[in-house]
Amino acid sequence: MRLVPDQIPGSEDLRAYVTKPLLDRITDQAIDSDYMAAAARREPTEEEPARRRRPGLWAMVVVGLFALLATTAAVQTSRNEDVRQTSRQVLVDRIEQRQDRISDLHQQISELREDNQSRESALNSLGLRAESASSTAAATAEETGFAPVTGSGIRITIDNAADGSEGGTVRDYDLAVIVNGLWQAGATAVSIDGQRVTPRSGVITSGATLRMNDVSLSPPYEVSAIGDTRTLAARFAETVSGAMIHTTTQDYGMPYDVENIERLTLPAAPSGLLELTHLGAESEDKGSKGTKGSAKPTNTDEDSEQNSEGDREE
């Protein structure tokens, strides 16, 4: 063990130092040396105080900065938490509003679906009614003469006598008699020279010309009728009108022919006849002699026969 020079005892203590037990001497010297070394380390030199003051100042600055950062972080965290809470509440409110809106829309959809089903049922009902009305209108139009019609039937041809006698000239009464006889025989549609006979049709005499539906007719006159070809001609001949026109044509030598036609097409009457005052005013202006035709017989055979005979006698 190396002894520090300052720790070597003087001569006066030499005896005590020498006589002191070795173990005690070693222990004392070790403890003294440690205290001396520690004291030497603790005693600052002239330069050390400045160096030791600087770490303390920097520590305070660091601690201050750390405290500032911690405070800032706490404040920011608090603000962020408030923002998060506010944002969350806003989102919750929006979600609830959207859910309410969706619920209202579902309710509206349900109501609209029910209304649509109701309207669809009404539309189907109206469609059926429209189809029925359309069928009825078509049948009525064909029956009254305001729609074209095609079918089998007969065609009666009558012409003026070749001698040109006044009695052998086809009159409006002759055509009216034929039309009435065809209705009685079961005809469903009749036309004269392509002019459809309707409830508002009329064959009138204008000078030496016959007119119907405001259209001039010319001989030979063709009277076409839709009906059962197996019975229509025979039943027409059995009527008083048929017998009378047959007798008239025989007596005055007027060409007369009846034939069955497998396919006849009768056109529709002019749409102007649907005007209620058109034909009536025209008939009144024409005056004098005239015979109105009809979609169905309106004159009896006896009246037609009397009118026709009286006219020919005149």
Image (spheres, rainbow, N blue to C red):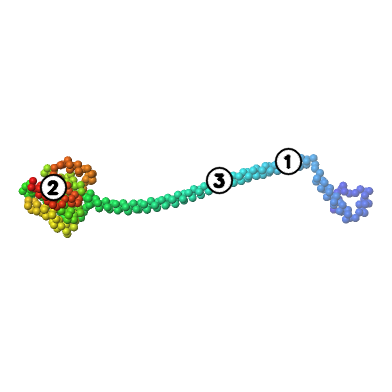
Q: Which residue appears at 40% of the width and 53% of the height?
A: 117
Judging depth in this view, the residue of 241 and 198 nearest the camera is 241
Q: Which residue appears at 63% of the width and 44% of the height?
A: 78
Q: CA distance from mark 2 to mark 3?
A: 95 Å
Q: Outermost residue toward the bottom?
A: 230
- Determine which of the numbered discs, if any, sits on residue 172 in the image: 2
Q: Which residue appears at 27% of the width and 52% of the height?
A: 136
Choose mark 1 or mark 3, whichever is in front: 3
Q: Earlier in the sequence, mark 1 or mark 3?
A: 1
User: Which residue in the protein does label 1 denote?
Assistant: 57
Figure label count:
3
Q: Residues within 10 Å of mark 1 (few under 14, many from 20)?
A: few
Q: Amino acid at mark 1?
A: Leu
Q: CA distance from mark 1 to mark 2?
A: 141 Å
Q: Quadrant of residue 280?
A: top left
Q: Earlier in the sequence, mark 1 or mark 2?
A: 1
Q: Earlier in the sequence, mark 2 or mark 3?
A: 3
Residue 220 in sight from this viewpoint: no
Q: Amino acid at mark 2?
A: Asp
User: Which residue in the protein does label 3 denote?
Assistant: 90
Q: Residues within 10 Å of mark 3 (few under 14, many from 20)?
A: few
